[in-house]
Image (cartoon, rainbow, N blue to C red):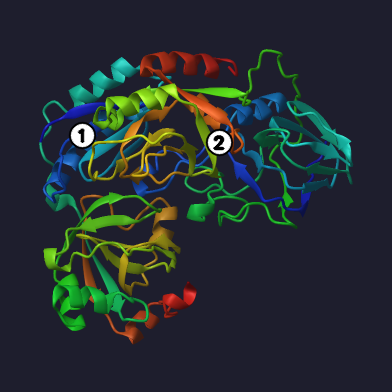
Amino acid sequence: MKLRLETAAMDALTVRLFDVIDERNMAWIMAADTALRHAFGDALIDLVPSYTTLLIHYDCRAMAFVEATSLARDALKDLQPADTQNGQLHEIPVWYDESVGPELPQVAKRAGLSVEQLIERHCGHDYCVFALGFAPGYGFMGLVDEDLATPRLKTPRRRVAAGSVGIADRQTAIYPLLSPGGWNILGRTAVPLFEYARRGEPLFRPGDKVRFMSISKAEFEAAGGDTTPLEERA
Amino acid sequence: MSQGSITVKQAGPLALIQDAGRFGVGHLGVTQSGAADWISFRWANWLLGNPINSAALEIVMGGNLTLEAGSDVCLALAGADLDARIDGEPLAPNACFTLKAGQCLTFRQPRAGLRAYLAFPGGLQAPEVLGSRACTAREMIGGLHEDGKPLQTGDQLSWQGDTSSPRRMPDNAGLPMPQKRCHLPLVLGSQIAHFTGRSLYQAFNQPWTVDQRADRMGIRLTGQALDSKLEGMISEGIPLGAVQIPPDGQPIVLMNDRQTIGGYPRIGALTPSACALLSQCLPGTEVRLHPVSATQAQVTHRRQLAVWE
């Protein structure tokens, strides 16, 4: 961990802690999140953690640039990694099927696996939530096994259904709401991520773990899942 | 004056309920949103004697947006001149006016600027989502029906106060209005060290043209391409006004509805006042970037905020 503070905007600073993505970063990022929230108090407008950084947006009516910079530096001086056991584990039921996960065959073929094996592998790993972004409640998770890593689609889809579970490179994520997107879609969950996020209580937060569970079509439907095939929405 | 309502007789291309925006929710992946030209937005509220960040209407382009009053109401209009008319009679922006019962207020097309702000007594009624009434189409959050949709024909607008204490716009108000050539102050930072010297020279020594590809998420500028030496970047939080340089070298200024995190290198960020000005620029407007320090920008910003206090 090497702390660097960068000017991001008139009233924003980037705290840079790492240069590469690693699940072990999250203990430090979460510790920095807590320390900065505490230090800035009411002068904090927004704090956005990501894989290797945190963006501090502070109220420049309450403190000047120089003060904000030294406040951040002091707050992070004796940083100790947070207890990663604090992160919650979320189990997300997913209906893996080609109709709602059109890239299942390609991703499996690339990895030299059957579709069943691919599903087993995607479910066989607790993924770390690195950051929320892109859309409310959209969690960037990883890292998926190296041989499952698949580059983004050459041409992004204009419409990816809410609940779609996808892979891009070594990351995996769930689309909380209908949006454009270029990830390889493997299946769909009925968990209403967007509803949680718009209430300000996202299901998962950076530092949490997510485990996917394969469910049947019947179970997916019973949970209120929408079985409309992905491509029909395009 | 009793509580009344206004009916949207015809929805233009884009009219959104906006306030200061959504704060403290960036870590949830929820964008800031809020009035793009926050200075004109504030003046509109100030003119009516409203709390300064009361929800108002952000009217983009005009496009024959037509509002009909159900009863007499005092409103304030600030920002762009969208050739507004009351029953066909021209209405100058940057003042309060009364819309009488049965009269129609129409916004035709931009004559100067792009976004007009219409303030209502006490602010518009709309449900709050995550502490704000701002309407964010991309996120399906906020607005009249909490679905992020812009105003639709048939919508009814109502407001929170029943009286207002109208004021006159001071002569030196200094509203953000694009001139022949706009100077946009930019606070240097972020990945600036990763750009070539030549690119940095070009960033600040050539005119940039505001592109057609411009919305509340980002505004693209075109000119001689800038080069970053950075190969692939890990996504990180992006502030308002961030000037990111995608692989084609043409800058995108990230505005109110930007994604909360992103992975293109940035040369810094426009000041909030520069964002307000840029949001008023029609495609084809020539702008120049002009480096300032964060400290210098904050002094100017505090002076700007003080005018409404």
Identify residue type, mark 2.
Ala
Residue B36: assigned label: 2
Residue A78, picture quadrant: top left
Identify residue type, mark 1.
Arg
Chain containing the residue with disc 2: B
Q: Residues at badges 1 and 2 in contact (C-beta under 8 Å)?
A: no
Q: Position of residue B263 (x, y in %)?
A: 30, 44
- As measured in the structure, the alpha-carbon distance from the residue carrying label 1 to the one carrying label 2 is 29 Å
Q: Nearer the viewer, residue B217 or B50?
A: B217
Q: Nearer the viewer, residue A70 or A165?
A: A165
Q: Position of residue A30 (x, y in %)?
A: 20, 42
Q: Position of residue B192 (x, y in %)?
A: 29, 28
Q: Which residue is mark 1?
A: A16
Q: Residue at x 74, y 37 (%)?
A: B82
Q: Position of residue B226 (x, y in %)?
A: 35, 34
Q: Residue at x 85, y 33 (%)?
A: B90
For the N terminus of chain A, the image quarter is top left
